[in-house]
Amino acid sequence: MTDQIHTEVVIIGAGPCGLFQVFELGLLGIRGHLIDSLASPGGQCTELYPDKPIYDIPALPVCGAQELVDRLLQQIKPFEPEFHLGQEVLEVTSRSDRRFDVVTSQGVRFDAGAIVIAAGLGSFQSRKLGVPGCDIFEGKQLHYRVKSADLYRDKDLVIFGGGDSALDWVLEFAPTASSLTLVHRRNEFRAAPASVTRMRDLVAQGKIKFIQGIAEYLLLEGENFKGVRVKGGDGATYDLVADHVLTFFGLHPKLGPVAQWGLELERKALKVDTEKYQTSVPGIFAIGDINTYPGKKKLILSGFHEAALAAFGIQAWLYPEKKQFLQYTTTSPIMQKRLGVSP
């Protein structure tokens, strides 16, 4: 166990909403620490669809998901947030002095004045391919996310999955891969109909292959990865030689320890007010997909709005004696100084 870290705010979740919460708090002169179960900031945007376009971010007609995360990280640089990645928050305990004790799965301990839960659908892990030996080749020849599309150029690829992520990458890699085979356990897909139509056209043209089936085991030559054997829905087996296997079965979300913190829940979401997005426990706030209230819409745009109002609620909780003023970044010398843009 480490020594306790004293901080004004702990933000649980480093997806877009958690990152924007840093910005809104920073404008008010409040700093905090971010904790996320994933190994890098960005949440689902980074983990599932980094190159997928987003069209409903204000003033950005189109923005890639990872681009959005990168822009948010750039935006919050003046506030110097500290990240604690690859760990979950296991314990949150309210104290009589209105502060909270927080403990993570790596034994990091915080003495926090307020908590913001921006954990999306909860902590999550990629659903695995589910055959022996996967962990040995994970991140080498077996992948659950795409970090760099150039890595797969002129390679033999096998992609598992039937949702948007799988179909998006099939369409992305079809023109550049040496060969590409899509494997899905059913002939029906959960992806956008337009994507399914384009994929079937590529199959009909002989540019990619589709096999209805499931992974049976990895193909090895000694200790070297060679591909994967698939058992087809027709009972036949297919040995698919591949440089890389990409699996997009989605993430396995779980509310996890949050469910044990005494917060009021409604259908596995945290109930909040719409004034400051505070939960049923004073001093604990929730923004983004993890919260619920009448009229809730699960949009990044909505999460940004919630972060702005939560920041003022957090300021009032931390400093109840302080009078609040609404200031604007265009005219406020204080905010401009915090942003590092003052003359």
Image (cartoon, rainbow, N blue to C red):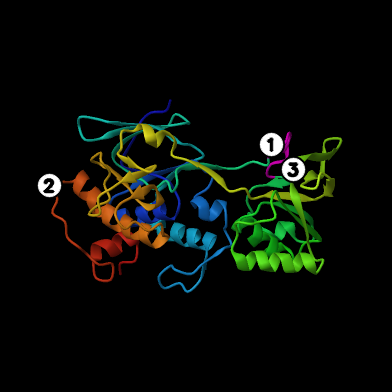
Residue depicted at x 25% and y 54% = 274
Dot 3 falls on a residue whose secondary structure is: strand
Quadrant that contains the C terminus: bottom left
Tell me the number on the disc at residue 321. Answer: 2
| Residue toward you, 311 or 233 | 233
**Lower position in the chain sequence, tag 1 or tag 2:** 1
Residue depicted at x 50% and y 59% = 70
Are circles 2 and 3 on residues that touch, CB within 8 Å? no
Tell me the number on the disc at residue 135. Answer: 1
Q: Which region shows up in magenta?
A: 130-139
Q: Quadrant of residue 221?
A: top right
Residue 49 on image: x %, y %: 57, 57
Are circles 1 and 2 on residues that touch, CB within 8 Å? no
Separation of disc 2 and disc 3 at Cα?
61 Å
Residue depicted at x 41% and y 53% = 19
Q: Residues within 10 Å of mark 2 (few under 14, many from 20)?
A: few
| Vertical comparison of 26 with 319: above or below | below
Are circles 1 and 3 on residues that touch, CB within 8 Å? no
- Residue type, label 1: Asp
Q: Which residue is mark 3?
A: 215
Overall secondary structure of the magenta section = loop
Q: Quadrant of residue 132?
A: top right
Q: Residues within 10 Å of mark 1 (few under 14, many from 20)?
A: few
Q: Is residue 2 magenta?
A: no
Q: Is residue 138 magenta?
A: yes
Tell us which disc is closer to us: 1 or 2: 1
- Residue type, label 3: Ala
- Residue type, label 2: Glu
